[in-house]
Image (cartoon, grey):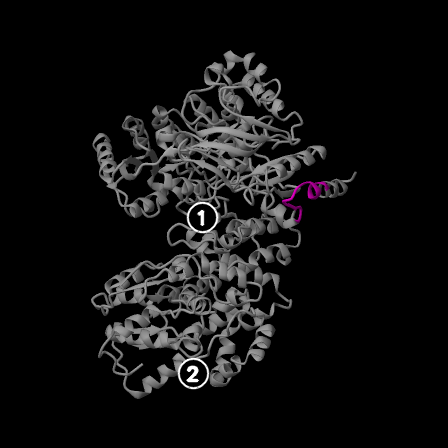
Amino acid sequence: MTDEQTRTSLVRALSGAVRGEVEFDASARALMTMDASNYRRVPLGVVAPRDADDIAAALAVCRAHEVPVVPRGGGTSIAGQATGTGVVLDLTRHLRSIVELDAGARTAVVQPGVILDDLRRAAAPHGLTFGPDPSTHSRCTLGGMIGNNSCGSHSVAWGTTADNVEVLTVARYGGDTLRLGRGRWDGAPAGLRELADSHLALLRTGFPELPRRISGYALDALLPERGPDLARAFCGSEGTLGVVTEATVRLVEAPEARALAVLGYADESAAAEAAPGLLPYCPLTVEGMAADLVREPAGLPRGGAWLFVETGGATPAEARARAEQILRAADAVDATVVTDPAGQRALWRIREDASGTATRMPDGSEAWPGWEDCAVPPARLGPYLREFRALLTAHGLRGTPYGHFGDGCIHVRIDFDLLSDEGVARFRRFSEEMATLVVAHGGSLSGEHGDGQARAELLPRMYGDELVALFGRFKDLWDPDGGMNPGMLARPARLDENLRFDVLPRRPVDVTFGYPHDDGDFSAAVRRCVGVAKCRAARPPGAGVMCPSFRATGEEEHSTRGRARLLHEMLAGEVITDGWRSKEVRDALDLCLSCKGCRSDCPVGVDMATYKAEFLHHHYRGRLRPAAHYVMGRLPGWLRLAAPFAPVLNALARIRPLAALAKRLAGIAAERTIPVLAGETFTRWAAKRRRRGPVLLSGDRVVAVWPDTFTNHLSPEVGRAAVRVLEAAGRTAVYPGRGVCCGLTYVSTGQLDKARRVMRRTLDRMGPSLGDPLVVLEPSCAATLRTDLPELLPDDPRAAEIAASVRTLAQYLEEYAPDWQPPRLDRPVAGQTHCHQHAVLGDAAERRLRARAGLEGELAGGCCGLAGNFGFERGHWGVSVACAEEQLLPSVRSAEPGTDVLADGFSCRTQLAQLAGVRSRHLAELLAEGLKGTDTHPI
């Protein structure tokens, strides 16, 4: 049969055998080409099994067709083991049930796609948790953790995943099922016992003793004095032996209270040498990181490196006492103890985000995994780190080590040049010498993430040829046909093959945005996504925004990572072959809300809103656009034309048949209500007000108020309130030239040529206001002026000048009128921080202003779901509502009576009005209401 006939036969057989989804289209394949490693392999297709029977059926079909299988969880593997050329089993889509949780026995039975944080939440009411906790705990799966034998920051207290697994149910290539436990050979593949019994001496002497020995197969778990422990021997096998269909895992008691001792040291070697001395005090963590990884050291004590040492106790006082005991025992330059949970979370976030922030050097250059997590005995960590730094220098490389110092396990991203032949050759030479260095210190090539393709080729340096040959025989007993994740662990691919950069264009792609953080290179911008998948977190941390569309749909293609993968494959041209015209990329980006949440929440600063605008610009160039682009994408122009006829148009919009027809023609969702046009625009009100009396212009007491489209035509009451507040603070409001526009709606719909014309016209019309402090009341417009304007007009110095002048109302008052006292309102508030404000502008000034005004309560994070034109467009209603229901609407519904609802964005206010019937207001409006006797010209 031809390849196409084989593929057709395989698809037909899989579709008939499994109840889950069978997807062999370009989009499904493109989404699974990469994990969080340097590697890329293109699969034939993807199967999302619904249950264990589906897994077995898929394995039987694949064996019959001689097609390899790769089990995949969250896809956050660092070494390439979650990529493959055959059928990828996506275990996250359906297999996410916690089958049983027995608090008395302290065990849980889980399916392989259960997210770690979901298990921890289920166990928390019983005072229990699952001990291993990698930094990807909000999106990694139990099946993936078993496959990689994951560890995390608490391994000094609770060990690795293998230490916490009781029983595994495993499906082998072909579909037969084994049940693996401890202390018995029942369930073992035929010949396994004989293999172990005939090599007892090698198994007893061939494995280094250290807490983070993850490399290779755990054959020493088969020794009679250790069980045998078949479940432990299977852990860390990276999908090369079979597929976990169900696991019984052990839970541990979670401390009632925790404290965090943060210890500062002169450098990372000093911190590393101090770490083993803290272990006798039984800490929960001993984590380390150096200053070259910390961009903003707020909250950290003095030092060039730090240890994060967590302690637990039955009470906060007990936890703190243990932390203070460690402070006294530690010979640190400086130290502090943090007991406040919010403070602890903020510090831990610095450490957890290191897996992403480490992908960029301080100068912005790229850094990559490859030697991400090797481990040495903790007592050897200090000398090892010094020699590691020397090896980096010898090869002209840079890296930023951090990680589990208490276990001797170091994470590091290194600025390998993986784009040129010379750079790849250096990558190989460094890897070979690095393996020798690790082994010389008695270490393991992998201390957490597994060997995969990155290190398995070098296992003979660690274990010797005889033991590595035994690994191959072990693999063959489980998988005699060689169909399970070939190229990993046993008979591995070379470490410099299948690099994901090989397929990218070697010359810069012609693009419209400037991409200043990526040297103007769109390929480099897309490469920013390294697959750590924070965007796949089911619940954003704190006030986080990213990624609302993924949380609404649960589909990989609607995550920031998924979209970045599709753009990568679009540039590669192998799976997605029609470039900027790609339907697959267009459909994935269609549900991107352009919330900009990824710009701030993604550890590596992926900016999907900009990539979406860029793609739409090229995709529709010279082609007919959706109706919504012509209507909502050009909203400023339409609203200017409509302003004189506002009363008539508002009356017509109340006639249902006419409104329905207008929405249909405009591409607006039928469920939406057309917003009411202002009877008097903000600019007209301001002009009339100026004519009524003299305006005092006094140097730095003058402030320009930006008449954005939404404030001007749809909510002028916000502008009037802001002027009143500014005047109460002793400022004189002026207004930029007539017809200025930030270009937001043109940018969000990818009409970038038009956006640049509008922006240039705006700069021309700014006149004397250019460079003055510019108060922008609509957060989305402020974000556009701050980021999109200079990135679309990088050669116009005026763009950077106006971007630097942008302030929110609260930011302006804090910076230019610090002595002004806002009115005391003393009442509770609820609502939402605008996603663009969160991502681009920050809301610290707003928080402080609310506190000074006595407005109490936290605003929700996330995205309202309307997001400018997104929620109005036909086909987006369901996702728009789901986004609002995630945080915004619940927070408002649960508010106490008498609570004011705050929403500075027009979209947020509109969403609240249309979905909840709630009137919400801009902070300026609440402040203006509290003012008395300060307005010379009534609002």
Which is more toward the observer, 433 or 405?
405
Q: Is residue 652 magenta?
A: no
Q: Which residues are magenta?
A: 13-25
Residue drawn at x 27%, y 85% as measured from the top left = 694
Q: How many marks on residues?
A: 2
Q: Earlier in the sequence, mark 2 or mark 1?
A: 1
Disc 2 element: loop
Closest to the camera, between mark 2 and mark 1, is 2
Residue drawn at x 51%, y 77% as measured from the top left = 637
Type of residue at label 1?
Val
Disc 1 element: loop
What residue did someone put label 1 on? 604
Residue drawn at x 33%, y 41% as measured from the top left = 291
What residue did someone put label 2 on? 679
Type of residue at label 2?
Gly
- Up the image or down, 766 lies above or below 82; here it is below
